[in-house]
Image (cartoon, rainbow, N blue to C red):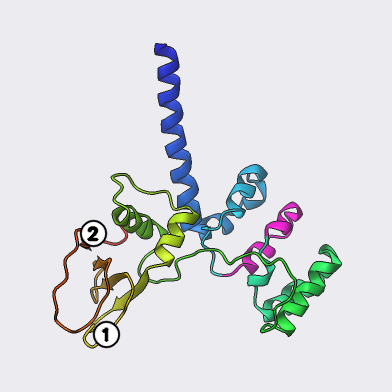
Amino acid sequence: MILLSTNLSKKKVLDKLWNHCIQEICCNSNYLFNYTKFINLNPAILEIILKRDDLCINNEIIIWEKRRLSRFIPLIRFYCISSKDFLLKIYPFKELLPNDLVNNILAHHMAPNNKLNINIQPPRLCVHSNIINCQHLSIFASWIVKKETLIIIKLDILFLIDSIYFIVLVGQHSMKNVIIKEQLLVIGKVTNSEQIVGGYNPLFWDSSYSWMSTNDSFIFSFKDRTDL
């Protein structure tokens, strides 16, 4: 029993370490795709990462440009690639793709406002911000759902964050005369520093100067947003 308990404890530690490493890679995917030995990485691990919705990449075309890993081509979200990149970087190599996929992508770009009978993967849920990354959102999500431990961001948590009105402020901005009838997470960066401050309002925001009561709001301050 003691041996079993020890092994289970080790497994929990290893699972936490695994989840932390995968999330770190997803939040900082440039380190992965710019790695000089990218081609030599374990294919099974690469497949796990490329399947994740929270893999934060600036442009899906980055994966295509690693097309030497042909087995991963089906994991590329082609419909999230711009028509320009598709035409210049993908179409010349269309023989690598199934004909129906090429035709569907062309139809998607030529008639973007029409509802086509095409199975389109959703875009990856990334944090497109120069101030915060998905690690910050993981912390905010854990506070919002009142978890004592850091949340490994998964699809449901990202949807939770996505359902909240999200504002990022840089420099001197005022929320005066702003009316938002949604939950609100405000994040501001102090000019000429790495400090970020903000707060979460689970009710709504207006400028009527009226009082409302809730036990679910919070404010926060990070002196250094790069040191979590």
Pick the residue in front: 72 or 226: 72
On the image, the x and y values in percent for residue 81 come to 65, 73
Q: Quadrant of the C terminus?
A: bottom left
On the image, the x and y values in percent for residue 189 come to 27, 72
Task: Write the residue at 55% across / 55% down.
Answer: 32
Question: In the visual, does 55 lie left or right of 38?
Answer: left
Task: Kindly identify which residue carries mark 1.
Answer: 178
Please give the range of residues in magenta: 59-75
Residue 106, numbered label: none
Three-letter amino acid code at the position of disc 1: Val
Task: Write the residue at 43% across / 56% down.
Answer: 157
- Regarding mark 1 in the picture, which secondary structure is present there? loop
Task: Write the residue at 73% across / 58% down.
Answer: 73
Q: Quadrant of residue 102?
A: bottom right
Task: Write the residue at 58% across / 51% down.
Answer: 49
Work out which residue is located at the far bottom of the displayed protein and give it. Answer: 177
Q: How many marks?
A: 2
Q: Quadrant of the N terminus?
A: top left
Magenta stretch contains residue 86: no
Task: Kindly identify which residue carries mark 2.
Answer: 216
On the image, the x and y values in percent for residue 24 come to 45, 51
Pick the residue in front: 47 or 120: 120
Instruction: Verify CB contact (< 8 Å) between mark 2 and mark 1.
Output: no
In this view, 58 is above or below 24 = below
Q: Quadrant of residue 78?
A: bottom right
On the image, the x and y values in percent for residue 201 come to 25, 68
N-terminal-most mark, 2 or 1:
1
